[in-house]
Image (tube, rainbow, N blue to C red):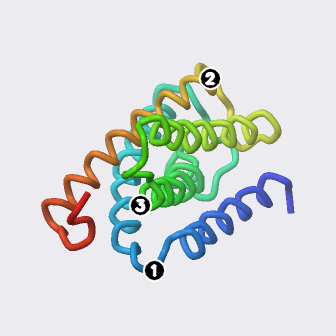
Amino acid sequence: MSLERSILLAILAFSLAVLYFGIPRSQIREALISFTSFQVLTWPVGLALTGLGWITYPIRMFPQASNLGFMFDYLLCPAVFALFQVRYPQERSLMKQGLHYAAYTAGIALLQWWVADRTGLIDYISWTVYLSVLLYLAEYWITRRYVIWFLRRWAPTLRGGR
């Protein structure tokens, strides 16, 4: 098995581990809403980036279906966002909330950059790690706003006081 295929399987295992072990049982519904909401946003953004030729995924799980890196954009990033959402320090200072955003977005962007630098899974054509951090910050902020709205509007018992 090639290094790239091994990394794709490791991403799958890590994503499932994050979802299974990182999400408290009492917050599974919130995590599912967060996971699927983030997928809704990252899928078209990823398709736009690959369609514009800014990022390519030479080795991917479903090469006939799309030019998108399924494991990153449709599994790993939403799983990490679900963890971000359920672990968000709502009652903490703005500094801690900002550090929470920074840690998660920079961490996922640096992981993606490392994979792009060390393997053939991702090629940055007209893209940089800094743009990834900014994009993830925007996606996290937008999706978090939606999840908060959804939970307050449609599931107040999940996050009634928040």
Q: Which residue is mark 1?
A: 25
**Residue at mark 3 to residue at mark 2: CA–CA distance:** 25 Å
- Taking depth in this image into account, of 15 and 93 the one nearest to the observer is 93
Circle 3: residue type: Phe
- Residue 159 tag number: none
Q: Amino acid at mark 2?
A: Thr
| Chain-order first, disc 2 or disc 1 | 1
The x, y position of residue 153, in whole percent, is 13, 60
From this viewpoint, which residue is outermost toward the bottom? Answer: 25
Residue 128 location (% of width, % of height)? 62, 23
Mark sitting on residue 35: 3
Which residue is at 59% across, 23% downward?
Answer: 130
| 18 horizontally vs 87: left or right | right
What x and y, as percent, mark residue 25?
45, 80
Q: Which residue is mark 2?
A: 128
C-alpha span from label 2 to label 1: 37 Å
Judged by depth in the image, the label closer to the viewer, 3 or 2, is 3
